[in-house]
Image (cartoon, rainbow, N blue to C red):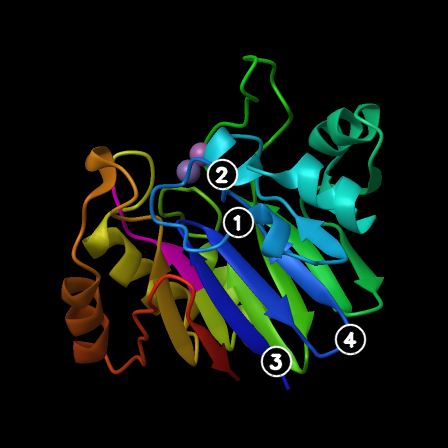
Amino acid sequence: MLKLTYISHSAFILDDGENQVIIDPYITGNPTATIKWQDVSANYIALTHAHGDHFGDTLEIAKANKSTVIAVNELANYVASKGVNTHNMHIGGSHNFPFGKLKFTIAHHGSSNNDGEYMGEPAGIVITIGGKTIYHAGDTGIFMDMKLIGELNQIDVFLVPIGGNFTMDISDAAKATEFVNPKLVIPNHYNTFPAIVADPNEFKQLVEKDGFNCRVMNYGETIEL
Ligand code: NI
Ligand code: MN
């Protein structure tokens, strides 16, 4: 069994009852977050890229919980230089963790940190935990290889950005959903800032027309899968 919590923006917590994995823990300064970073007790933090609205409270959470940060090599080395445990990986590579398998995919985006230093390639994450396979696309434009990701993995839940401007917009995200062919799609990365205002129900209607299940989650909401 898997509990999935949507914090807001791109931040999700996956909980199999023994392990908690938080993806892109942007909480402090996130105008739509309903929790504090101190409320998070994840033993793993997985990062799609280094931008502040994804890296977020990584160092604080990791230090308080002795969490392991999973990221591509360049970003993981930066995190390790701050005194935090890391598991360095890279795109196309997968590893079996106590919670299950995690693999990094490509994403078309950037990955500099708040000091403007480049932190390697941005990524998406395919993670199997609690018997479910989740694809978190990270920040990205649409790309044809999403079809391959959907063919190589039976995706139970697709976490897709819909806010436009920095990532896919609603119509591209709907096409991406066709490529990935998930059992459930959950939109994210919208309405956090004026530049990424989008109506998730418009996305929901669009993908439902194509026969997909879509769930628009509230900030702080948890669902069981
Ligand atoms: Ni970004
Ligand atoms: Mn972002």
Instruction: Give the amino acid at mark 1.
Output: Lys
* Left or right of residue 129, residue 206 in this image: left
Of mark 3 and mark 4, the one earlier in the sequence is 3
Residue labelled with disc 2: 28
Q: Is the residue under label 4 in contact with that under label 3 (CB below 8 Å)? A: no
Q: Closer to the observer: label 3 or label 4?
A: 4
Q: Residues within 10 Å of mark 2 (few under 14, many from 20)?
A: some
Helix, strand or loop at mark 4: loop
Task: Classify residue 40 as left or right of residue 139.
Answer: right
Q: Nearer the viewer, residue 47 or 32?
A: 32
Residue at horizontal 52 percent and vertical 59 percent from the top: 12
Q: Residue at x 64, y 86 (%)?
A: 1
Mark 4 or mark 2: whose residue is earlier in sequence = 4
Q: Position of residue 65 (x, y in %)?
A: 78, 51
What residue did someone put label 1 on?
Answer: 36
Indicate the amino acid at tag 2: Thr
- Mark 3 → mark 4, Cα distance in angstroms: 10 Å
Specify the amino acid type for callout 3. Leu
Beta carbon at label 1 within 8 Å of ligand 2: no
Residues at discs 3 and 1 in contact (Cβ within 8 Å): no
Circle 4 is placed at which residue position? Answer: 18
